[in-house]
Each structure stands twice: as structure tokens, then as C-alpha cells.
């Protein structure tokens, strides 16, 4: 159940930060997972740690979010 919660939470963050649908958010997660060979669950858990306390309301923070999403696989397990 915790695995599902992390995925759902991070999908919501992606939806909010990037203004995309739930389906598109999950497609992004699947793509990063397949491209980096890191499980979706691990990407989401690390991404939640990376983004704890960040407010995604301005453009600079949304840019930061994009960079975090694109590089999250490098921090999994660290």
C-alpha cells in the first residue's frame, strides 16, 4: 500500500507542477523508469524525498522540478 501511495503522491505533484493529466504524469514516470532502468516506485520515493518542502508555485521552482525529475534515477539508493 505504501508503494501505491508514493506513486499516487508523486503523480499528483507532476500533474500540479507540469499542468498535465494523471495519465500523462504516469506516462512520464514510466518513461523515466524504462529509460533509466529504475523501478517507478523507487523513482517516486526518491522524488518525494527530493521535493520535500519545495513550493512549486513559480517558474524557477518548476524548472527545478523538471531537472529533479530528469535526474532522479541518479539518486535512487543513495
Image (cartoon, rainbow, N blue to C red):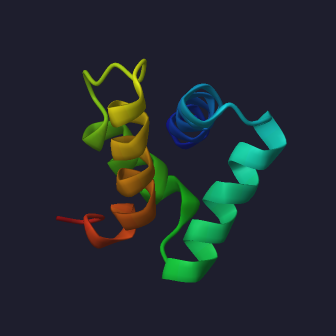
Camera-nearest residue between 45 and 65: 65
Camera-nearest residue between 39 and 20: 20
Residue 18 sits above or below residue 31 on the image: above
Drawn side of residue 9 relative to residue 50, left or right: right
Q: Pinpoint residue 68: horizontal percent, then vertical percent.
A: 35, 53
Q: Pinpoint residue 2: horizontal percent, then vertical percent.
A: 50, 35
Camera-nearest residue between 66 and 14: 66
Identify the residue at the far front of this view: 59
Can residue 37 be seen? no
Q: Residue at x 62, y 57 (%)?
A: 29
Q: Quadrant of the C terminus?
A: bottom left
Q: Pinpoint residue 49: horizontal percent, then vertical percent.
A: 28, 39
Can residue 48 be seen? yes
* Residue 62 in which image quadrant: top left
Residue 48 sits above or below residue 27 on the image: above
Q: Residue at x 56, y 31 (%)?
A: 5
Q: Residue at x 36, y 65 (%)?
A: 71
State how many labels appear.
0
Drawn side of residue 45 relative to residue 16, left or right: left
Residue 37 sits above or below residue 23 on the image: below
Drawn side of residue 65 relative to residue 5, left or right: left
Identify the residue at the far left of this view: 78
Drawn side of residue 43 relative to residue 35, left or right: left
Q: Quadrant of the N terminus?
A: top right
Q: Pinpoint residue 66: horizontal percent, then vertical percent.
A: 45, 50
Amino acid at each position: 500500500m505504501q508503494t501505491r501511495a508514493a506513486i499516487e503522491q508523486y503523480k499528483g505533484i507532476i500533474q500540479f507542477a507540469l499542468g498535465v493529466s494523471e495519465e500523462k504524469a504516469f506516462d512520464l514516470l514510466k518513461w523515466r523508469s524504462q529509460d533509466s532502468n529504475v523501478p517507478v516506485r523507487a523513482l517516486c520515493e526518491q522524488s518525494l524525498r527530493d521535493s520535500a518542502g519545495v513550493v512549486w508555485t513559480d517558474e524557477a521552482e518548476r524548472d527545478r522540478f523538471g531537472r529533479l525529475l530528469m535526474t532522479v534515477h541518479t539518486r535512487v539508493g543513495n
